Amino acid sequence: MLVAFDVDDTLAKFNIPLLNVYNAIDGTNYTSRDIKSYNLEMLWGCTKEEAIQRIQYFYKTHEFGRIVPVEGSQEAVEKLSKENQLIVITSRLSSVSRKTEEWLDKYFSGKFSDIYYTSEWHSANGGSGKKADICRDKKVDIIIDDCLEYILACQNVGTRGILFDLNGEYGWNKTEEEIKRVLNWEEVLKKIKK
Ligand SMILES: [Mg+2]
């Protein structure tokens, strides 16, 4: 099978260091549960453009350089790599591709045959379905992502979506949609086997 992985908050613990940086700047005390939307401007009370600038600034911080893998992700990718082709589809900007590839090399060396950058989050219009386009064009069998909107879009083009919600703490992917969440990487492996 061809299995696609999101990076931020699926393979990489992204939101906690991001919140740490801006909690310090803003004097706030937000946690993952406080992020109720993928649109971070709603948390920060700023414009989309300012939220994009904040993410781009975060890419330059030491905290971004010290991001660690989500617990269990390395073992799960190792297991899945034995019988499947694995790729990465991230909504990060391609301007951060070097740092992204260095990070993937450090923690998931040689496991991914391709890395696609959609810049999707950074578009002023929000998600534009680019992850779903890649899933359709490459005939991706399964995608694992923490973003409900991306999962639903990918399912619409025939890719099986697994919504990742670490320990049920991801406040941004909770809606009334009838979609089952997986709470850790062991559950991802069990779900793929079914
Ligand atoms: Mg993500």
Image (spheres, helix red, strand yellow):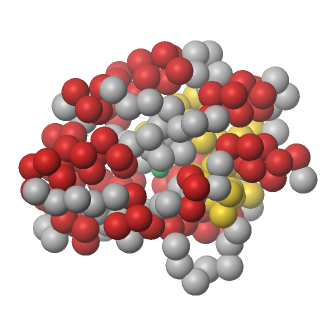
Q: In the rendered view, does 39 fall on the left or right side of 175?
A: left
Residue located at (38% from left, 31% from top): 67
- Asked whether 163 or 170 is in front, the reply is 170
In this view of the protein, can residue 71 be seen by the observer?
A: yes
Q: Residue at the far right: name it.
A: 194
**Looking at the rendering, in which quadrant would you find the N terminus?**
top right
78 sits to left or right of 5: right
Q: Position of residue 88 (x, y in %)?
A: 56, 36
Residue at coordinates 75% horizontally, 50% vertically from top-left? 187
Residue 48: horizontal and vertical position, in percent?
A: 20, 64
Q: Is residue 49 left or right of residue 31?
A: left
Residue 121 or 173: which is nearer the viewer?
173
Determine which quarter of the picture holds residue 47.
bottom left
* Left or right, 33 with reference to 136: left
Task: Please report the residue visible at 56 percent of the width from the left and 53 percent of the height from the top.
Answer: 166
In the image, residue 10 lies at what x, y percent? Answer: 54, 45
Q: Quadrant of residue 155?
A: bottom right
Q: How many marks?
A: 0
Q: Position of residue 22 (x, y in %)?
A: 17, 50
Does the image show residue 113? no
In the rendered image, the vertical position of residue 154 relative to residue 4, given as above or below: below
Is 23 placed above or below 95 here? below
